[in-house]
Image: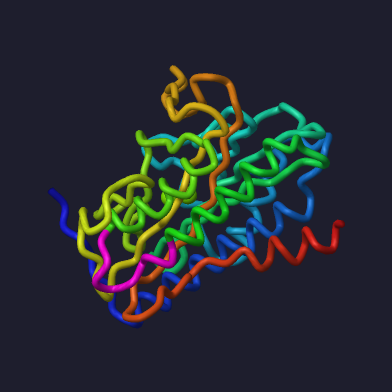
Amino acid sequence: MAKIHYKTIEEIELIRESSLLVSKTLGEVAKVIAPGVKTIALNKLAEEFIRDNGGVPAFLNYHGFPYSLCISPNDQVVHGFPGQQELKEGDLISVDCGVILNKYYGDSAYTFAIGEVSEEAKKLMRVTQECLVLGVQKAVAGMRTGDIGYAVQEHAEKHGFGVVKELVGHGVGLALHEKPEVPNYGKRGAGTKLEEGMVIAIEPMINAGKANVKFWNDGWTVSTSDGKPSAHYEHTVAVKKGQPDILSTFSYINEILERKK
Ligand code: MG
Ligand code: MG
C-alpha cells in the first residue's frame, strides 16, 4: 500500500502554480466552447496552452490515455475521449484537465453548459457545484475523508441525484493519483484522517438519475447506466488548520462565462 505524501509549504506553493495553470487552461477552454466546436479542437488548444506555459499535459499518456483533456458530454461521467463530434446547443460537457509543472501536479474539472440546457441539467450543475463546495469545506485538519464524502452524498441525494461510487477523488501533487482515496460518499468520522500537508483532489461526479455507471470497452470512458446526464467539478485543495486552501480556481472560467452572457 502506497503511503500518503505529506507536502512542505514550498511544495504546496508549487502545486498551487500547477493548479493555477490547470485553471487558466480551463479558462481558455471557456473562451471557445460553443455549439459547432469539435471537442478535439479543445484538446489541441489546451495542450498548446499548457506547453506554451512551460507545463506538460498530465493526462496525455497517463496509463496510455491518448489525450490532454478528458471531455465527457451528457451521459458520459468522466474519462471521455475528445474527437470529431461537434458540440451542440443543450449539451452538458465535463472537461477535466491536469498538468505537470516543475514536476508537480494539479488537477481540476468543470462542467460547461453549451447554450441553453434543460432545467434538469441546470439543477444538476448547480447541485454538483454545491457538493464540491460542501466537500471542500470539510478538507480541514482533524476531519476525515468520510466527512467529505458524507457532505457530498447527503447534498446530492437530498436532491434525488445519484452519487458515482466507482470513481473517487485522490491525493495529488507528486503524482496525479496518490493516497488517500477521497470518495464522494461515506460516513462522518470514518476514513482517513486529514492532516496538514495533505493535498487532495475533491471531485464529485453526480448523476441526474441512478448512481450506476458503465465502463466502455475503449478502456476509459465511463457513462451513466440509465443514459441520463452526469456532472463533474473538481478542485485541488491543500488541507490546513481551520480552513481549506483551494489551490485551483474557477475564477478564470467564471470571468469568461460572465463576459459571454
Ligand atoms: Mg481531474
Ligand atoms: Mg482527479
Q: Give the farthest residue toward the front.
A: 158
- In the image, taking residue 138 as reference, residue 221 lies left or right, namely right
Q: Of 134 and 1, which appears nearest the observer?
A: 134
Percent across and percent down for residue 164 are 42, 36
Name which quarter of the figure residue 5 lies in.
bottom left
Residue 69 picture location, percent across and down: 56, 44
* Region rendered in magenta: 136-144
Look at the picture and state if 70 lies above or below 169.
above
Q: Position of residue 39 (x, y in %)?
A: 69, 36
At horizontal 49% and vertical 44% (from top left) the residue drawn is 158
Q: Closest to the observer: 185 or 64? A: 185
Q: Is residue 143 magenta?
A: yes
- Furthest residue in direction left, as rendered: 1
In the rendered image, which quarter contains the C terminus?
A: bottom right
Residue at coordinates 27% horizontally, 50% vertically from top-left?
A: 187
Res. 196 image quadrant? bottom left
| Vertical arrangement, residue 203 with respect to residue 35, above or below | below
Q: Is residue 61 covered in magenta?
A: no
Q: Residue at x 44, y 63 (%)?
A: 136
Residue 30 location in percent, x, y? 73, 54
Name the one closer to the observer, 101 or 33: 33
Is most of the magenta stretch helix, strand or loop? Answer: loop
* Residue closer to the observer: 223 or 26: 223
Quarter-of-image position of residue 86: top right
